[in-house]
Image (tube, rainbow, N blue to C red):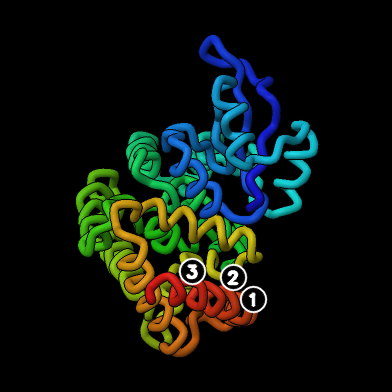
């Protein structure tokens, strides 16, 4: 076990708080928290905030006490630290600027979409994911100068998980939202139709050969699969939290089926640039996760 805790030092709500972390995995951290009655609302991206009256019993339960500076150092070294600039609540201004740069002149629609991406049930499909997809699109298209030339793709990124309930109709509902809202703000019919088509493609991430726009969006959406191992584990832990209502064995079987389909379905990335940058690392991450899941599913 690699559960770490710093001394009660951080003031809030009339008491002092410790930070409880794992330098091995978020799964281990959440398991320890559940076993010792820490509420889910106490989790803040990479740590639990623990009131000082719980400090002694958590140490007695096995949490390793460390000075705050050493705890942070260990968390950073593990790759599980979420930097302040990466926290979704810090991203509103960045995302609002990106929305305005699209030139629609529809700030109220941007605010509506940000509200969608900020819903409390989202642990992975949140503002950080939206910015990651937009950033990956910049990488694939050549950056900010190319955004207006690829306007339908960038709009589809904004809408692709705008509706997210963890159901089979999320993509259809997100596409319907685009179809309803974009015409109200003067977006031309052909652009709206292309946005709808692209959003629906994210259900399978399998654009047809020669579908350059589809390849851009699908590859950007799957960039997360190729992240360094620790960041990939953060992603899988966040996805698991979105399906916390599903028993471990059932989740492992369902997720394993998805991963096998990805690994056996040819290239993960439809575009040449995506394959060059991300294919090898993504396959390594998926294979490692699948091995872990199969142990749980048995």
Q: Are marks 2 and 3 in contact (CB under 8 Å)?
A: yes
Residue 190 lies in quadrant: bottom left
Q: Which residue lies under the disc numbered 2? A: 226
Q: Which residue lies under the disc numbered 1? A: 277
Q: For the view shown, which residue lies furthest in the top direction?
A: 14
- Whether residue 222 is visible here, answered yes or no, is yes
- Whether residue 93 is visible here, answered yes or no, is no
Q: Which residue lies under the disc numbered 3? A: 222
- Is 232 in front, or is 93? 232
The residue at 46%/45% (across/down) is: 127
Question: How much space separates mark 1 and mark 2, taking CA atoms?
Answer: 8 Å
The residue at 21%/56% (across/down) is: 173
First in sequence: mark 1 vs mark 2: 2
Q: Are marks 1 and 2 in contact (CB under 8 Å)?
A: yes
Q: Residues within 10 Å of mark 3 (few under 14, many from 20)?
A: many
Where residue 65 sits in the image (x, y, percent)?
71, 35
User: Helix or strand or loop: what does disc 1 sit on?
Assistant: helix
Where residue 283 sits in the image (x, y, percent)?
56, 80
Question: How much space separates mark 2 and mark 3, taking CA atoms?
Answer: 8 Å
């Amino acid at each position: 076990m690699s559960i770490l805790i710093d001394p009660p030092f951080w003031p809030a709500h009339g008491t002092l708080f410790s930070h409880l972390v794992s330098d091995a995995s978020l799964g281990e951290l959440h398991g320890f928290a559940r076993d010792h009655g820490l509420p889910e609302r106490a989790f803040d991206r990479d740590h639990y905030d623990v009131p000082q009256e719980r400090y002694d019993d958590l140490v007695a339960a096995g949490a390793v006490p460390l000075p705050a500076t050493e705890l942070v150092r260990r968390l950073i070294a593990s790759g599980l630290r979420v930097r302040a600039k990466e926290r979704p609540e810090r991203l509103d201004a960045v995302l609002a600027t990106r929305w305005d740069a699209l030139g629609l002149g529809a700030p109220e629609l941007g605010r509506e979409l940000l509200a969608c991406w900020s819903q409390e049930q989202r642990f992975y499909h949140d503002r950080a994911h939206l910015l990651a997809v937009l950033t990956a699109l910049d990488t694939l298209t050549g950056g900010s100068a190319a955004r207006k030339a690829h306007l339908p793709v960038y709009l589809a990124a904004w809408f692709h998980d705008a509706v997210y309930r963890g159901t089979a109709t999320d993509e259809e509902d997100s596409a319907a939202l685009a179809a309803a809202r974009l015409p109200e703000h003067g977006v031309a019919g052909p652009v709206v139709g292309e946005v709808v088509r692209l959003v629906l493609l994210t259900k399978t991430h399998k654009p047809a050969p020669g579908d350059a726009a589809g390849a851009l969006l699908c590859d950007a959406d799957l960039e997360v699969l190729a992240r360094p191992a620790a960041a990939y584990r953060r992603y899988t832990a966040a996805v698991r939290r979105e399906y916390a209502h599903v028993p471990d064995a059932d989740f492992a079987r369902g997720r394993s089926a998805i991963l096998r389909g990805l690994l056996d379905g040819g290239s993960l990335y439809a575009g040449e640039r995506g394959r060059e940058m991300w294919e090898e690392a993504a396959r390594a991450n998926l294979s490692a996760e699948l091995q872990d899941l199969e142990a749980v599913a048995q």
